[in-house]
Amino acid sequence: MKIIQASSEIITATPDLEQVIELAGRVCWKSEDKICDGSAEKLIKFLKGKNHASVMEHGVITVKIVCDRGVSHELVRHRIASFSQESTRYVNYSKDKQGGGITVIQPCFWGEGTAMFHEWKRACQQAEETYLAMLDNGAGPQEARSVLPNSLKTEIFVTANVREWQHIFELRCAPAAHPSMREIMIPLQEKFAKYWPSIFGDHLDA
Ligand SMILES: Cc1cc2nc3c(=O)[nH]c(=O)nc-3n(C[C@H](O)[C@H](O)[C@H](O)COP(=O)(O)OP(=O)(O)OC[C@H]3O[C@@H](n4cnc5c(N)ncnc54)[C@H](O)[C@@H]3O)c2cc1C
């Protein structure tokens, strides 16, 4: 059994995202003649102030997230997004290609060496043992998966427009969100803010 950390990676986005949103917004006022260096930032701020949120839907961002199945289950509740996720029906974790066992995500709330971490690790190892024994006895991956833990590693592609990403960050970076969700979403929001500060950088001013 392998234990890894959760992670995220921006795969692709609408090229010149801020400029595309500016161009779309300026069509409303036919103010394209005002486009110059720094004008996208001003226009986006103005649109946000007016809650002219639909203009943000012209930009799309795709991200790959490596997380546990608990987090992915929460992520897929977001309805205005597209998902492609590693399947526990089709992937057989006993195969050499998969490392001959399961991979789990280390919970960010239990430090290594603590009693809780030890109990968690033991439970995951027991689940792996049972999963592999079931496969050995003729079960298919889609049947043996019944015993796999919530901590099982999954990979998921998420594509959403800018407006939906703003909504996702609002909910999933908040203190009420699950710690494992925040562990992924807070750094991801930072990455978005670095690439597209006028759209995703508001929290940095707060
Ligand atoms: C801290 C936290 C705890 C939660 N706990 C639970 C729980 O215990 N049980 C549970 O089942 N879920 C829970 N959820 C999930 C939550 O109920 C939502 O399903 C999830 O957060 C998706 O958010 P959303 O519906 O706002 O947004 P999305 O699905 O991302 O949609 C974005 C926005 O589009 C609009 N929209 C989308 N679909 C419709 C529609 N059909 N009709 C009208 N407007 C629409 C809404 O304005 C919505 O906010 C929890 C979420 C959080 C953040």
Image: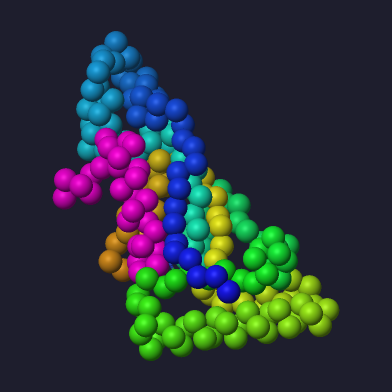
| Rendering coords of residue 179 (x, y %) | 35, 69
Q: Is residue 19 above or below residue 54?
A: above
Residue farthest toward the left in the current orientation of the protein: 206
| Rendering coords of residue 108 (x, y %) | 37, 71
Along the horizontal axis of the image, is 196 left or right of 66? left
- Split into quadrants, the picture shows ligand 1 in the one at bottom left
| Rendering coords of residue 123 (x, y %) | 53, 85
Which residue is located at x 44 percent, y 71 percent?
106
User: Is residue 199 visible to the viewer in this orientation of the structure?
Assistant: no
Along the horizontal axis of the image, is 131 left or right of 74? right
Which residue is located at x 35 percent, y 77 percent?
111
Specify start and end residues of the magenta stretch as a single range. Answer: 177-206
Q: Nearer the viewer, residue 35 or 30?
A: 35
Along the horizontal axis of the image, is 51 left or right of 107? left
Name the quadrant of the N terminus. Answer: bottom right
**In magenta stretch: residue 166:** no
Q: Main secondary structure of the magenta part?
A: helix
Q: Is residue 38 above or below residue 114?
A: above
Which residue is located at x 49 percent, y 37 percent?
12
Residue farthest toward the right in the current orientation of the protein: 138
User: Is residue 44 visible to the viewer in this orientation of the structure?
Assistant: yes
How many labels, in total? 0
Q: Is residue 151 above or below residue 67?
A: below
Q: Nearer the viewer, residue 156 or 56?
A: 156
Which residue is located at x 27 percent, y 35 percent?
198
**In magenta stretch: residue 180:** yes
| Rendering coords of residue 174 (x, y %) | 29, 62
The image quarter containing residue 149 is: bottom right
Q: Is residue 67 above or below residue 33?
A: below
The image quarter containing residue 52 is: top left
Residue farthest toward the top in the current orientation of the protein: 33
Q: Nearer the viewer, residue 111 or 56?
A: 111
